[in-house]
Image (tube, helix red, strand yellow):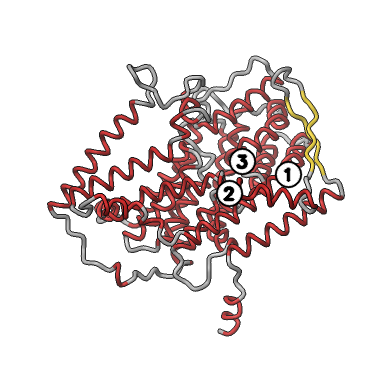
Amino acid sequence: MNVRKIKEKVTLHPIMTILMMIGITILLSGILATIGVQATSRKISTATLEYNTYIAEVSSLFSLSGLKYIFTSTISNFMAFAPLSSLIIVLIGIGVMQKSGFLKVAFTLLTKNAKKNSVTFVLVLLSILLGIIGDLSFIIILPIAAILFETGKRNPMIGIIASFAGLTCGYGINVIFTSIDSSLLSLSLLAANVVDSNYIIKTTGFIVIMLIAVIALTILITKITEKYLIYKLDKYEIPETEIEEELFLGKKEKKGLALAFLAFAIYLIIFVYNIIPGLPLSGKLLDDSQVFYIDKLFSYNSFFSTGFVFIITIGMIIVGLFYGIGAKTIKNHRELCEDLGHSLDGIGQVIVLIFFASILINVVKYTNIGTVIVVALSNIVNETSFTAIPLIILLFVISAVATIFVPSSITRWSIISGVTIPVFMKAGISPEFAQVIFRFGESTTLGITPIFAYFVIYLALLEKYNKKEQPINIIKAIRYQLPYAIMTFVLLLTILIVWYIVGLPIGIGVSPTL
């Protein structure tokens, strides 16, 4: 008992853990830069399709210029840190829906007669499928998952952990072709054309294996959550102020729901019409300079991409407002204005946590340590004599390890693809299958790397709903994700090997082999 108390007393606050990681990164960058650590690789020129030498070097922060960089870039980096601004904006919309009573009524109706397993299954499935909207899915799903489980009188931390597992383990598994897939495909095609200038990669070349992976992964994450995770977390004690009688759906509540869904339907029709190209006065949210429709949606210049968080938030406010009007929970404009800030109550600690996390990510990126590691790993593929299954396993493991140090898919694939795909094609493996291996590999470790920008949102929400005196630190947050990461590693690698052996098509007209 005394030993346990001592262990609890030395538990580091997540902010202190981040500060220690920042200090270690600065010191390590100084040591590695001093001894001249670097890695040399080859990159393909888009103009000539020829290889150019690429040297990645560690940049030192353990110097006067490095310290100046930290101090001069910290504020601007924090202000531009997308997870913070997106989270605050989305929480405004969630606050209106929650305070008006819409979320409680809607979630209670949806889960009233549903089994706990079914609720978890649907949440995980949505988390995986919503990967189509990119990183913004983390901002939307995680806080709503917490409220969903809390409404169902379950520990909201379960909802946060399960949905984060779905979002990260399913990050590289998309049934619908996404903007990230499009960028990766361009890099894959560039590398493939070095070997065969006439090679064409189809956007539908991944759909079959992705569909099977989505189903299998959803079942796996649900099983881990319900059979393992719930026993690792303390039983959630509902505060007495939240203990209410069974929800009564009266005329006011029904009227509120009817108004909310009608208003949302109108808003949705207007929104959808503006992302459909080719109709009269339609497509105003698209970037018409792009070729693929998914790029028209999510390019940096599209109104849809740049304003998506705001679009979603307005939709949430509309739903909450019209429900409140119908249910008489919002009686005037003053109550609406107060509801706008409801979800922001007590968010100060979250903002501080995000502030230090933004410094850590900025520091790691500046040092270039992750890039050096990825370049070194990519050289292993180029130098190996592996073929077939050993080559598949090698790329899968390299992708998983590289993700821990460089979470950005496009940055990693821009380094790895030019070396990897020619090797795979010479071994008789298709570029499409190589890209699938890469994406499956990154899905296994994205949830356990603290330098992933949205990991801090996961950590901050866990701490927000933590009922214990001891904080949820980074190590504990990673520990919650480890079972998902390990089992996802086994599952996805098994799918890849079986798929290769059997020779099933991974998409329409695309095989694992050439």
**Looking at the image, which residue sits at the far left?**
251
Q: CA distance from mark 2 to mark 3?
A: 19 Å
User: Is the residue marked by circle 3 packed among few (<14), some (14-19), or many (20+) residues within 10 Å?
Assistant: some
**What residue did someone put label 3 on?**
408
Q: Disc 3 and disc 1: Cα gap in Å? A: 13 Å
Q: Nearer the viewer, mark 2 or mark 3?
A: 2
Query: Measuring 58% from the left and 61% from the top, which residue is drawn there?
Result: 474
Q: Give the structural element (helix, strand or loop) at label 2.
A: helix
The one of 500 and 240 positioned closer to us in this rendering = 240
Check the image and name the residue furthest to the top.
198
From what the image shows, is residue 511 above or below residue 462?
Answer: above
Quadrant the C terminus occupies: top right
Query: What residue would you read off at disc 1?
Result: 368
User: What residue type is disc 1 on?
Assistant: Asn
- Residue 405 horizontal/vertical position (percent): 67, 47
Distance Cα–Cα, label 1 vs label 2? 19 Å
Label 3–label 1 contact, CB within 8 A: no
The image shows residue 248 at horizontal and vertical percentages of 17, 59
> In the image, what residue occupies the spot 58% across and 49% down?
78
Amino acid marked by disc 2: Phe
| Residue 62 placement, left or right of 277 | right
Q: Quadrant of the N terminus?
A: bottom right
Give whichever of discs 3 and 1 has the lower sequence position: 1
Q: Position of residue 85 (x, y in %)?
A: 49, 46
What secondary structure is marked by label 3? loop
Front-most of 455 and 413?
A: 455
**Dot 3 amino acid type:** Ser
Q: Residues within 10 Å of mark 2 (few under 14, many from 20)?
A: some
Q: What SS does tag 1 mark?
A: loop
Can you identify the residue that label 2 sits on?
Answer: 78
Report the side of 34 relative to 274 (left or right).
right
The answer to which of marks 1 and 2 sits earlier in the sequence is 2
